[in-house]
Image (cartoon, rainbow, N blue to C red):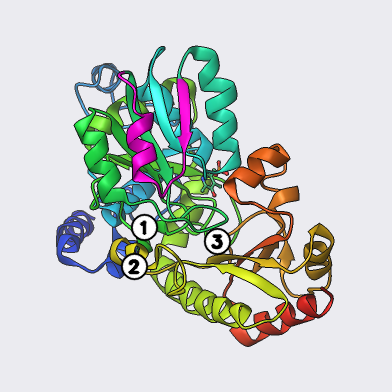
Amino acid sequence: MSDLRQRQQQLQALLADCDAATKAVRSGQLSGLEQEHNDAIYATSSFVYASAEEAAARFGGEVDGNVYSRFTNPTVATFEKRMAALEGAERGVAASSGMAALTSIFLGHLQQGDHIVSSRSIFGSIIGLLDNVLAKFGISTTYVEPTDLNAWQQAIQPNTRMLFAESPSNPLAEIADIGSLSSLANKHNALLVIDNCFCSPALQNPLALGADIVMHSATKYIDGQGRCVGGIALGSEELMEPVFAFLRTAGTTMSPFNAWIFINGLETLQLRMQAHCAAALKVAEWLQAQPKVEQVFYAGLPSHPQHDLAKRQQHGFGGVLSFTVKGHRDAAWRLVNHTQLMSITGNFGDAKTTITHPATTTHGKMTPEARAQVGISDNLLRVSVGLEAVEDILTDLEKGLKAV
Ligand SMILES: *Cc1c(COP(=O)(O)O)cnc(C)c1O
């Protein structure tokens, strides 16, 4: 048994020099007696001790170890370590959802009177969190065009503590210049937080580009098969401590069952992302050649305004693209309704190709004016290109386009 412990420890040390593909499969495996099974699920709410002394030492924090699964759990810890290895972070703090990870970042680091400058092209629920929740507690937000560095600069106030952006953005694939935003944040003593959902750690590592904190909705590519909801915040030990302190108190904790799904999802992340990227580029190129398609939004196309920036800061262009069809909402809906293979849903990052009409689903809560401002028109469709044969995906899109 002790040989197994030694072997596991050697393996974890070895991984520092390994490729990301190897880290995705191996990092964070538990060392010690508990690891007789490969990545076992710790379905336990609390932990037991050998003596009153040990219990007191664990509860008092003098000895490291688990106390209660709202705080820490070995399966969740494996997920956190594996993600930290992939993002080049000192520490990861897993949360019950992407939104819970963000809530923990915001409320762990900000207080009444603070100000956030945020890209306006962010996930809809995050706008709700900033405008309807944080605003109630005296934390205000100014929204800017993600690609306009000047606008970011001008929006900074003396009380600005955080810059927030999603890159590439959903659904229009706008690319924020993470390195430049990091310099701006540093200059003003603010933290740069990057939502890395669309790339996953396989395609972009914001911390290496200068971001302070990176967050993921594990629900998307990290799971990869649309099974459960989860999230994670990653960064330095120092910046993660307040996030963890909020999370363990507020209870925005990840379930060990979900952590186990994500650990397994990560093992195929690198392979899946390569396949998603290759297929999405083919779909984007094909769409661009269709007379009924007005415009294609995908950073992998040389025609994309931030193609070069995306090439510099990402290792791939991702699996999600958007396009506008000629006509109005009816034309877009007809296309959706005449597909047969793709799933009609709001999710992305699944092995199954999904198609979404953002204006009436994921972005339906925005006012038409707000949608117009961020470029989400009624004839816009988003496709998350899955792992089916790309020829079959194109055939399905062709059926849809014929009906436009
Ligand atoms: C899904 C998503 C979130 C929120 O994650 P949940 O797991 O749904 O809470 C945040 N940002 C982006 C870009 C997302 O796609």
Per the image, is 323 magenta?
A: no
Query: Which residue is identified by label 1?
Result: 201
**What's the amino acid at mark 2?**
Asp
User: Is residue 244 depicted above or below 370 in this figure?
Assistant: above
Q: Is residue 278 visible?
A: yes
Image-quarter location of ligand 1: top right
Q: Residue at x 52, y 37 (%)?
A: 99
Q: Secondary structure at mark 1?
A: helix
- Visible in this render: residue 29? no
Work out how far the residue at label 2 is from the one at label 3, CA to CA, in angstroms: 24 Å
Give the mark, 1 or 2, whose residue is nearer the N terminus: 1
Q: Name above or below for residue 375 compared with residue 299.
A: above
Which of pointers 2 and 3 indicates the residue nearer the eye? Answer: 2
Q: Read off the residue under disc 3.
A: 349
Image quadrant where residue 181 sits: top left
Residue assigned mark 2:
308
**CB-based contact (under 8 Å), mark 2 and mark 3:** no
Q: Residue 289's quadrant in the figure? A: bottom right
Q: CA distance from mark 3 to mark 1?
A: 13 Å
Q: Quick check: marks 1 and 2 in contact, CB under 8 Å?
A: no
SS for callout 2: helix
- Measure how far apart labels 1 and 2 are at the Cα level: 20 Å
Nearer to the camera, 40 or 354: 354
Amino acid carrying label 1: it is: Pro
Q: Is mark 3 within 8 Å of ligand 1?
A: yes
